[in-house]
Amino acid sequence: MKNRLNKLPSQVQKILKAASLAAAKLDCSIYLVGGVVRDLLLRRSVFDFDIVVEGQAIAVVKVLAKIFKVDFSRHHAFGTATIIVGGHRIDFATARVEHYIYPGALPRVKPANLVDDLKRRDFTINAMAISLNKGDFGRLIDLYDGLSDLKKGLIRILHKESFSDDPTRILRAIRFKERFSFKFESKTGKLLKQAINTKALSLVNSHRLRDEIVLILKEPKPYRYIKRIKELEGFRFLHPKIRLKPADFLFFIRIEKELVTYRRKFRKLRINQDWLIYLAGIMLALPLKTIEKVMADFAFKKGERIIITSIKSKLKEIKKLEKCKKKSLIYKLLCPLSFEAIIFFYAYYPNKNLRKNIDFFLETLIFTKLKVKGKDLKKLSIKPSKIFGNIFEELLYKKIDKGIFSKKEELSHVERIYKRLSLKKN
Ligand code: CTP
């Protein structure tokens, strides 16, 4: 494995060597573990590194933080710490055993050695380690034939209670299977189905389920993953009434396509949360109130909730874009929406005129800016109040529809709008 480690970015190599020395001085043993080992063996790019220390992980991190002059964050309960160097996240954990007091519970952890630490892991391909210890630096430690399963393309659990101990592994198994186009080893496949039949996922804390579904939807081309979940488990873990139909899958494929088109066409516009578009698609058939409840129960962030609920609540209104010709109306309909919601509608409605209007909004309307500022209104003796907002809004729509260009023209419109609005008020 030494040659694989030598291909890592030089900054990471320096850290691994320094970690090795620090551990030796502290009389601890130290290993790279889990997904990073799997990905190095698969020759995939690695950005995040998990390191296990037999002894005190924190002590090693403190030494490294000093050498590399970086801060570290620490999680006392789990004895873990993280440093970020050159864009790479390096997590250090004290080797531990996990004990599940009931299925789906968060595990109780106790310090242990590497063998115990590997024994608690989900799949053989994720249960390998590489020694970083002086003397055998770079040696692969493969207690469960993970390398052979990697070669055969198999997802295999380490023991038969794996899915019942931690049912999130049902979703993880699907994620890794689809990511690598692997198969379930036959016993693992049977136990996975058994766990599904006993509704094991219903025992898991909603926050953990949320993290898993987000990870799945963040995978490139999540369509395949959604399909596999539907075939195996369904989405009842999110809500019992989610039932995806074949047409929904055609829609997910269109989302994938539109995301590519959108990124090519509108390079400057940022869309960061593709996964939300898919999640909105999964929940679309639920009533708005139910979607709001699911988003709250699973503690999605406020911004995420707004995007998902805006998609559901604006679904019908956006249809107006099929016939709409008035530029300011196009603006009014699309401006409050996130780019994620816009892409959703782009994929949802095949109508040519609707898509043309969205294009026009993204290419042109979105860049409309007023030249008049608040201070210009004050100069016209307009007192800052709610009326400011109303004037700006109306002026913007006028500018969009009538093509007002100079500041002078804008100001004369301001005066007219102001007169009309104050007359209305009186
Ligand atoms: N792990 C586990 N059971 C879980 C979650 C994690 O056994 N429910 C172990 C696995 O050994 C996994 C490691 O913890 O490799 C790190 O977890 P995570 O970062 O979630 O997985 P990665 O394998 O690194 O996956 P990814 O490539 O998606 O980051």
Image (cartoon, rainbow, N blue to C red):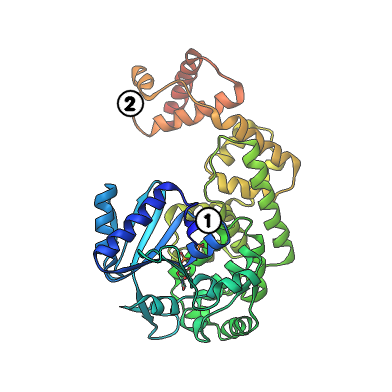
In the displayed structure image, the side of residue 325 where residue 398 appears, left or right = left
Rendering coords of residue 306 (x, y %): 48, 53
* Residue 346 visible within the image: no
- Quarter of the image where the C terminus is located: top left
* Residue furthest front as drawn: 135
Residue located 55% across and 24% down the image: 399
The numbered dot on residue 178 is none
Instruction: Say whether residue 416 is visible.
Output: yes
* Residue at which label 2 appears: 383
Q: Could you say which is closer to the camera, residue 198 or residue 399? A: 198
Dividing the picture into quarters, in which one does residue 99 lie? Answer: bottom left
Quick one: label 1 or label 2, which is nearer the N terminus?
1
Q: Residue 378 appears in which quarter of the rendering? A: top left
- Taking 258 as reference, is 246 above or below it? below
As shown in the figure, which amino acid type bears the numbered disc 2? Lys
Q: Position of residue 197 (x, y in %)?
A: 60, 85
Residue drawn at x 71%, y 67% is 245
Callout 1: 10 Å neighbours few (<14), some, many (20+)? many
Look at mark 1 in the image and give the residue it sits on.
309
